[in-house]
Amino acid sequence: MKRRSFLSTTTGALAATGGSLPLFSIGKPGPSANSKLNVAFIGSGGWIAQQPYNQGCKEENLVAFCDVDRAVCAENMKNWRTDQPFFDDFRVMLDKMHKEIDAVVVSTPDHTHFAATLDCTERGIHVYTQKPLTHHIRHCRTPETARQRPKVMTQMGNQGHAGDGIRQSVEAVRAGVIGDVAEVYCRNDGPQMGNDHFADPETMPPPESPVPDTLAWDLWLGPAEKRPFYRDYLPKKWRSFYDFGNGMLGDWGCHTLDTPVWALDLDPPTVVECLDRKPSLDGVIPAGSRVRYHFPAKGDRGPVTLTWFDGPQDWSQVGRIDKFGAEHAAHLGRACWMIGSKGLLGCGTHAGAPLILPNEVRAAWKENPPEETIARVEGGPFREWLRAIKGEGPEPGSNFSYSAKLTEIILLGVLAQRFNTRIEWDAEAGKITNHPELNAFVKEPVREGWSYGENL
């Protein structure tokens, strides 16, 4: 069944119970009288949905909500008006209401980011998609192409990119405060398998569980291959399964690697290698790993290696963090270190303010900070995106041109981790050259009715 045919026969939406939407919206012909945007949400439950709501979107016209799990968004639904329709299939929502929607926030699990995002951009709807931008490497290039459509403003939800701290770090590195950078180390202590965010099943495939009455399971699967429901997929533990999530590197890498990728202008690497990996069942993320990226020289910068650590790690094994005699106490809470010829720059999991070592280099930086060459963002990433849509500010910093590149870097590491191997990447061709059999995972097949962007 073709996607368009599927849409015409699907009845996943609840009818609105009253009221009406504005006749015109900002992104459509003729501005609305109150100059507010008509915003819809794909993925309307849980904490992540509250974030855009409380950081700018509630000041606009909230015109529609979509979620496949009514139990997850039940609390949020209490705050919605009866004239705000609720859908369980975003394809139906967009088919029925795309002319009345200016902007959409996509807060679904990783494996449906691409489909929801492309369905919006193909209709000329502005979109904010949570990280990582896509679930598969090949898909990273399609949203960036869609971004080139006229007047479509895009943003990926790596929130730290809009902060002052990351701008201070980027400006310091580019000004040569820590000298030439050739090594980067990033880490996260998770996952803690079996906690609220990560599953550790005893078998794969995991045992079948009854489908909750509130869950549209087939819609939750979306483009993924059909399979029985397993209770630990939801609400958050899908991150442990490569078919749906991308583990710690996919979950946190878009935050923690953001600073070095931006500061050093890193393009996709030529080589990614998994140096160490805890054992796991097939299709399940490990409890820890080490992955090393090799980035070629570019412009005035030499080659860079970036090593990612997840799971419990001993910083004494990291490498040259102590090159300048940095105190071990200073390492705590720093998820990223860039090692320069003059000093080190450390930052947090979500970027944040930099810590520069040794002390004399930090003192000189504070006394004579580099010029602010990057405009600061007021109010956070959602307001940055909304202002850009209204023509009141520049294009968002984590637009799909930037975030697609960052996501491709992340996902190459995930693939090396998944198969515990070395990947040689031809970025221009978008292919793995040393393990051609792994190209099947660069863009995995999708179920009928869920194909997007094939002609872009």
Image: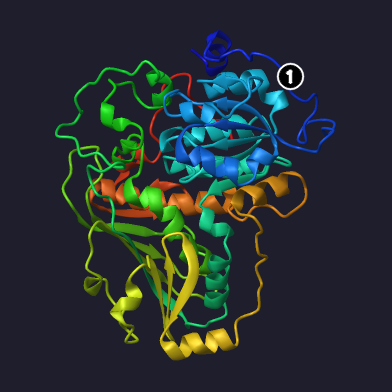
Residue ID at (64%, 40%): 57
Residues packed near mark 1 inside 10 Å, few (<14), some (14 to 19) or many (20 plus): few
Residue at screen point 39% across, 48% down: 251
Colouring scheme, one of rainbow, by chain, secondary structure, one colour: rainbow
- Compared with 323, 148 (above or below) is above
Q: Name the quadrant of the C terminus.
A: top right
Along the line of sight, which residue is nearer the eye, 330 or 75?
75
328 relative to 207 in the view: left or right: right
Q: Quadrant of residue 447?
A: top left
The answer to whether residue 453 is seen in the rendering is no
Q: Position of residue 117 (x, y in %)?
A: 55, 35
In this figure, what is the number of numbered marks?
1
> Where's residue 127, x and y in %?
61, 39
Element type at marker 1?
Answer: loop
The image quadrant of residue 161 is: bottom right
Residue 307 left/right relative to 361 = left
Visible residue check, residue 367: yes
What residue did someone put label 1 on?
20
Q: Residue furthest top?
A: 9
Image: 368 above or below 91 = below
Near-viewer residue (443 or 383): 383
When the figure is inspected, residue 217 is found, relative to residue 124, above or below; the finding is above
Q: Measuring 60% from the left and 52% from the top, which residue is drawn there?
A: 381
Image location (x, y in percent) of residue 201: 19, 35
Query: Is 28 above or below relative to 344?
Result: above
**Residue at position x 39%, y 20% in the image:** 215
Q: Amino acid at mark 1?
A: Ser
- Give percent across and percent down for residue 432: 36, 48
